[in-house]
Image (cartoon, rainbow, N blue to C red):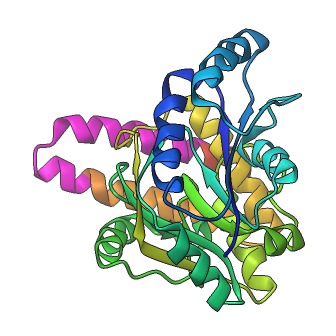
């Protein structure tokens, strides 16, 4: 029987954290082993002080005010280093567990000595529990293909990564691969840890019986600030593993061009305008770095 540590990194998430922690407690009460909840808050002191009042009700095992907002990975590393569990559950504050059998998950990790990373079935955010890594992504084909593969629950860590909204990690193996790369503030973390997990001969696995609700919208339009962060991370990730950033951008542009043609002939003016803006942004990126 393995012990579990839930690490929840928050940033202005006080309105979400109570339901998140309550969903963990709902299932952990049935488990005979140890389950701890660690909240790492990346917010300002004022927001953190409000969170301390909430935590008087929800009573996490540890509440840590991070010394800096170093992003998703850095915050999770703080929680992992403070944890006692053998299995780390990385969980976004906007996630609500809907099904998890801790005994079953413990047994899966005990039986599979090569298992380093596992994920569950996500509901919300187009119900995508896993996706193709950036070096293989060709969105005009990836989108319909991975919609089908997610429905079938067919996952391969050779080409794909599990959603970082909820991940189960073998702590010993995760520390061996170097934990989260703190040069990455946001985005591409899942692809990065999957590649390093694979390089050590470990495996990633999709556990369909673990389910959770991810409270995000089905976002398509690219916010300029979000795109800036994503692109900075993407450049770092592609350079780190010697993948072609230019090829990725070209595939993305071609995908948008095909989609615009489809929206034009189907009279989807709203989507046409939205994807026209996305196309323009990626053309700027290509022009900026490669012309």
Instruction: From this view, report whether residue 156 is shown above or below residue 185.
Output: below
Q: In the figure, is residue 260 to the left or right of 199?
A: left
Give residue 235's position: percent from left, percent from top: 74, 55
Residue that lies at the very extreme toward the top in this rendered image: 46
Instruction: From this view, report whether residue 207 is shown above or below residue 38.
Output: below
Instruction: From this view, report whether residue 9 is shown above or below residue 50.
Output: below
Q: Quadrant of residue 200?
A: bottom right
- Name which residue lies at 73% across and 64% down: 238
Q: Main secondary structure of the magenta part?
A: helix
Give residue 91's position: percent from left, percent from top: 59, 49
Q: Considering the image in quadrants, where does the N terminus appear?
A: bottom right
Q: In the figure, is residue 139 to the left or right of 249?
A: left
User: Of residues 103 and 221, which is closer to you in this image?
Assistant: 103
Give residue 160's position: percent from left, percent from top: 54, 75
Q: Quadrant of residue 13?
A: top right
Q: Is residue 287 visible?
A: no
- Name which residue lies at 58% across and 23% down: 57
Instruction: From this view, report whether residue 217 is shown above or below residue 159.
Output: above
Q: Quadrant of residue 275?
A: top left
**What is the span of residues highlighted in magenta in the rendered image?**
261-284
Residue 69 among magenta residues:
no
Q: In the figure, is residue 140 to the left or right of 234?
A: left
Residue 282 among magenta residues:
yes
């Amino acid at each position: 029987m393995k012990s579990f540590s839930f690490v929840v990194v928050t940033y202005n998430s006080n309105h979400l954290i109570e339901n998140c922690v309550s969903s963990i407690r709902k299932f952990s009460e049935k488990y005979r082993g140890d389950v701890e909840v660690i909240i790492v808050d990346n917010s300002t002191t004022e927001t953190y002080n409000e969170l301390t009042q909430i935590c008087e009700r929800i009573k996490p095992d540890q509440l840590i005010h991070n010394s800096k907002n170093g992003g998703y990975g850095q915050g999770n590393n703080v929680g992992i280093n403070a944890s006692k569990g053998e299995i780390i559950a990385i969980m976004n504050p906007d996630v609500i567990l809907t099904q998890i059998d801790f005994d079953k998950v413990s047994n899966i990790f005990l039986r599979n000595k090569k298992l380093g990373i596992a994920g569950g079935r996500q509901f919300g955010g187009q119900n995508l529990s896993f996706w193709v890594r950036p070096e293989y992504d060709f969105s005009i084909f990836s989108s319909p293909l991975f919609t089908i593969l997610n429905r079938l629950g067919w996952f391969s860590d050779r080409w794909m990564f599990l959603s970082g909204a909820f991940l189960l990690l073998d702590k010993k193996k995760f520390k061996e691969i170097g934990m989260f790369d703190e040069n990455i503030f946001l985005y591409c973390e899942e692809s990065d840890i999957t590649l390093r997990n694979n390089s050590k001969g470990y495996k990633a696995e999709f556990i369909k019986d673990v389910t959770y609700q991810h409270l995000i919208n089905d976002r398509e339009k690219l916010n300029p600030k979000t795109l800036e962060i994503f692109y900075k991370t993407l450049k770092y990730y592609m350079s780190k593993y010697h993948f072609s950033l230019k090829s990725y951008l070209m595939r993305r542009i071609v995908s948008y061009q095909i989609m615009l043609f489809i929206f034009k002939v189907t009279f989807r003016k709203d989507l046409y305008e939205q994807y026209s803006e996305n196309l323009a942004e990626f053309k700027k990126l290509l022009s900026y770095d490669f012309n």
